[in-house]
Image (cartoon, helix red, strand yellow):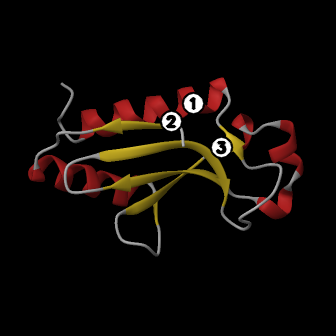
Amino acid sequence: MLQFVVDELRPNEIERIVAFLEKSCKKSELDNLFWLYLPDDLLTPVQYQHKDCKPFCAGIEVTEDKVIFEMLIRSRSRLRCNCISYATDQQRQFILNFVDTVLKEAEILV
């Protein structure tokens, strides 16, 4: 799995990150898992055509001392389809920009 990991975080930093993710992302049914939805203009042609597979998102997992940003673009309505794939360059940049925003909002990067 391709992912971007921010580790060695303190408990208070994790709390601030979770608070920001709760405002900015969709919380999963699973504890400490969030969904970052991708805007339609970043979807690949196949993803855009697969209207039944929308919405598309990247997973964000929060553990005791790290945050894991997945680079796999998933469908929220299907587990397997050819529209599920690793992030394109533009999608990856969108996720990495979001990482920067999370860290700034959580006052980890100032």
Rendered location of residue 98, percent (x, y)? 43, 36
Q: Earlier in the sequence, mark 3 or mark 2?
A: 3
**Mark 2 vs 1: CB contact within 8 A:** yes
Seen from the viewer's position, the closer of residues 44 and 71 is 71
As drawn, the label of residue 39 is 3
Q: Which residue is mark 2?
A: 95
As drawn, the label of residue 77 is none
Seen from the viewer's position, the closer of residues 107 and 70 is 70
Q: Which residue is mark 1?
A: 92
Three-letter amino acid code of the residue under disc 3: Pro
In the shown orientation, is residue 51 left or right of residue 34? right
Three-letter amino acid code of the residue under disc 1: Arg
Q: Is residue 37 above or below residue 52?
A: above
Residue with the most extreme bottom position:
29
What residue do we see at 18% from left, 34% from top? 108
Q: Earlier in the sequence, mark 3 or mark 1?
A: 3
Circle count: 3
Q: Quadrant of the N terminus?
A: top right
What residue do we see at 66% from left, 38% from top? 86
Q: Is residue 82 above or below residue 88?
A: below
Three-letter amino acid code of the residue under disc 2: Ile
Rendered location of residue 53, percent (x, y)? 78, 61
What residue do we see at 68% from left, 30% from top? 88
